[in-house]
Image (cartoon, rainbow, N blue to C red):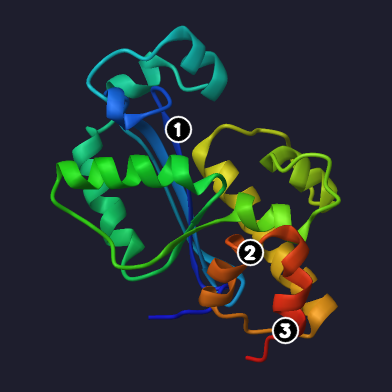
Amino acid sequence: MSHRADSLVILDFETTGLSPDVGDRAIEIGAVRLVNGEVTERFQELMNPGRRVSAFIEDYTGISNEMLVDADCCESVMDRFADFIGSDNLIAHNASFDKRFLDAELARINRTYCGDFSCSLLLSRRIFQDAHSHKLGELVRFSNIESSGGFHRALYDSEMTAKVWMKMLENIGERYGLFDIPFELIQKLTKTPKKGIDKVLSGYSC
């Protein structure tokens, strides 16, 4: 199992609402696998939550009820996605949201994952402190990443998150001479106050 910060799975869910605790379900999962900073595999599937999605969610995600009618159920898709994750560490933008849905959907099928979960949003607040906002679209613009602007579809958001992620790792490398960054350092940074980031990175040796 790789513990490098540039070798992991970056994922994104589209869902029927904000919380599985009140019965919301996943309707799409998208993910990319990074190995040494390069995308080597992609995963994208719609899933039928067993009920209609609201007009707001249709409009927000571009995923219509008609698109979900013939999709496999959440349980089948999530079983395949658990296989895709393997033993990799995981990243999402605003990971607390995606982790809740991943944990809830996998619990329904008695599956789990052994990697650690961290958050590109939390890291961006510490590495890209000058960004006007740390929403994914704003970070894509801030990082001068080419984008077709099709946000709120799971695979596209995962791919954009992966590009922002690598920009952040490159930024750490350029500023502090740290390359082959371990995932454990990322986890430490996301829990470090902004003003303490420079001290942690300046004093770190791989």
Q: Is residue 61 above or below residue 97?
A: above
Mark in the foreground, 3 or 2:
2
The answer to whether residue 15 is visible is: yes
Quarter of the image that includes the N terminus: bottom left
Direction from residue 154 to residue 28 in the image, left or right? left
Circle 1 sits on which residue?
Answer: 14
Residue 23 picture location, percent across and down: 27, 24
Q: Amino acid at mark 1?
A: Glu
Residue at 70% over, 77% down: 200
Q: Nearer the viewer, residue 92 or 22?
A: 22
At numbered mark 2, what does the secondary structure look like: helix, strand or loop? loop
Residue at 75% over, 46% down: 139
Distance from disc 1 to disc 2, alpha carbons, whole Å, reads 29 Å
Circle 2 sits on which residue?
Answer: 192
Mark in the foreground, 1 or 2:
2
Residue 16 picture location, percent across and down: 38, 22
Residue at 43% over, 43% down: 98
Q: Amino acid at mark 2?
A: Thr
Residue 107 picture location, percent across and down: 19, 46
Residue at 58% over, 43% down: 157
Circle 3 sits on which residue?
Answer: 178
At numbered mark 1, what does the secondary structure look like: helix, strand or loop? strand
Q: Residues within 10 Å of mark 2 (few under 14, many from 20)?
A: some
Distance from disc 3 to disc 1, alpha carbons, whole Å, reads 34 Å
In primary-sequence order, the first of circles 3 and 2 is: 3
For the residues bearing labels 3 and 1, Cβ distance under 8 angstroms: no
